[in-house]
Image: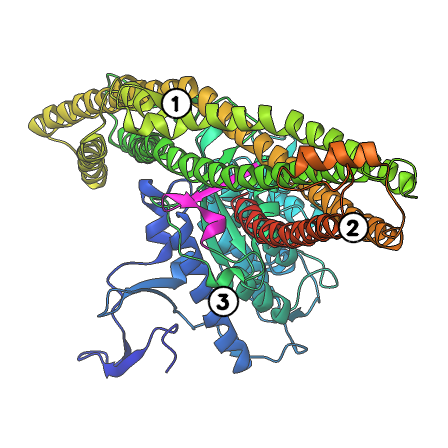
Amino acid sequence: TNEIIVKMVAIEAELESQKKILVMELCDAGSLFTILDDPQNSYGLEEEEFQRVLKDLSAGMKYLRDNNTIHRDLKPGNIMKFISVDGRSIYKLTDFGAARELDDDEQFMSLYGTEEYLHPDMYERAVLRHPANKPFRATVDLWSIGVTLYHVATGSLPFRPFGGRKNRETMHYITTTKASGVISGVQHSEKGPIEWSRELPKTCLLNQGLRDLVTVLLAGILECHAEKMWTFDQFFECAMDIISRRIFHVFYMNEGKEICLYMKPTLTLQDLKEQITLQTKVPVGNQMLLFDKTLFSTQVHPTAEISTYPTTSQSQPIVLVHTENPNVKDLTRLSTLSACFPNFPSSISPEHDAALAKTCCSVAHAVKRIVVKLVRSRDLLLKTPKTLISVAVDTVSKLCTSCDTLKQKTEDLYHRCDQLEKSTNMIADFLSLWPNEHDCDNELQTLNFIVTERKQFKEQVKQKFIPFYSAINTLKQRVLNSMHTPEKGLQAEWEQLASECSHLTGCVETADTYVRIIRGSWQSFVRDRNARGLSLQDEQFHILEKIKVQHTSKKLEALLQEQCLKSCLQASNKLDEWFSGMQATMVQCKYLKEDLAAVNSLVKSYGASLQEAESQAYDLSIRIISSLRSSESKEPNQKQASISIRRDSSNVEEINGEVPLKMKRQTYTKVFAQLQNLKKEHSTLWEIAEENNILIEKFGNMLRETN
């Protein structure tokens, strides 16, 4: 009843012998062994298909264990691919002829299975025929799963003695003497050393993120010692962890490198960046992540779980830009082939020619994968500058807005400082009416000292702000103003460079055509091999097929080397040329953000200092006024009073050369009122400054969010 198990439809009887025949569910996509034997999968299945196999295989085994059943003959040949009516691919377990009920802690003695996939203890008895009374547990299925998954991931068996099956003693030696954590052992020559490995081979098509996870799983179940081998629960937990992870496709622009991150759904943006660092060596602080034509950080909350993040793909990945690295490497290293097209001998040998044609077909599929990857990488390289320009425009716009707001704030503070100085001068002029009688010299000196200090502080602010403002304007001219001038600026520079790159339209389709031609020839060679003999005419056709394979292989290789690589090399070189200027702009933006924070902090300190000075000046003014009020009854110096009052009050009338007491009181009252108004004006200016502070902090937060 489980969809991961091949269903038995009916039991029929043969007409003549009356032998029972099991009618099973049709899986017309073939067995996993047939799929792996196809030249397309010589280096294993691609990532998405591997995950599907892992998911279905672990689900099928979970169903068996929940029903206390062991399979005892797990291998690719007993895993069938089924295409459901909705188009889904499902891998189903079949051939339960060796299956039996068995609890985890139960043992059994009978022998079943296919030798390459057998647990070493079973191999020793079933294949080597060594007498042994070792009982076996249900975990022997885990070893078979490990060998199967390695085969699916790499296209090869993990333990391979020189000479293959016939070298049975070496096979047993490899599987029983390997160290814990080793997942493969290969002997390349007769009686030669064993090449051990704790990692999947480089030819494996899985990305590094998935490789690391699968390697841990394989190391846990490819253990011949029962005390070291994982339990089924550990296997199911690890498999479920791999299957349930969120996949993030990332394109590292500076190296033209595609990476794939397998992240637990509960992790956050910081974890994502740290995982990127592990695979690219780019420090978290130097990572600029772009997605869907803008900064990735603007689309996600830094503390939100990555399960809520937007979906990525190979064609629409997160683009990683190293902000401190001005170089872009060319993509030629992506064209490295693990094998080359073989040459056919002039003689006719159907068996040998079929093997060579299969190798040609395998290499052709590898070349096609490289062509697809190069075309995709080239397209991403050419698209990324537009996103970088868009981000730069947004960043510079915010910087300019913050700078303009800060400029207005500094001008307000300058005005307040000037007002403070004017107020102090006015008080000094007024006190000159009482040159000897008043007792305000200390207060006046303090006021002058406060004003002098704030004027010096004002000059410090100017020295910091003026070059900063000039740098912002220069950046604005390069990034923003150039957007309205088609022949200048970063965008115009890139459009000119990109137009010089040749196109790759139709390259993927052409490569696919060449691969189909080579596959057709390989299938023709297989038919010739299976035939009992070739007629003279068949031999002529056989020779023509050999010529066609070699000719098509050369055309496919030329497509890769002379067209795809050439265009990709142009694109990466043009981007490298342009990106140095873009990277300088990015660095300048980074430093200007830091300068903005520093200048803003200085202006904020200046504002606080000015507010304190205004408060002190106000208190001193009150004390001076109080002191003057207490000395109103005293007679001021007639000459000085007469001169000062004439200077400041042309309408004051003198009586016998003296200023009447009433007039003096009116003058004091007027000055006091002016001081009161000055206080109100300072309060209003401070409220404006506070509003500006709030705006500056908001823009500062916006800029920090763009980092």
Q: Residue under circle 3?
A: 58
Query: Magenta part of the protein: which range?
Result: 287-299
Q: Residue under circle 1?
A: 575
- CA gap, disc 3 and disc 1: 45 Å
Q: Are marks 3 and 1 in contact (CB under 8 Å)?
A: no
Q: Residue under circle 2?
A: 661
Asked which quadrant contains residue 469, the reply is top right
Q: Decide: few, some or many residues near mark 2? Use Cα within 10 Å; few <14, some 14-19, many ≥20.
A: few
Asked which quadrant contains residue 14, the reply is bottom left
Given residues 179 and 241, the one toward you in this image is 241
Residue 135: numbered disc: none
Q: Is residue 482 visible?
A: yes
- CA gap, disc 2 and disc 3: 107 Å
Q: Secondary structure at mark 1?
A: helix
Q: Is residue 196 visible?
A: no
Q: How many badges with numbers are in the image?
A: 3
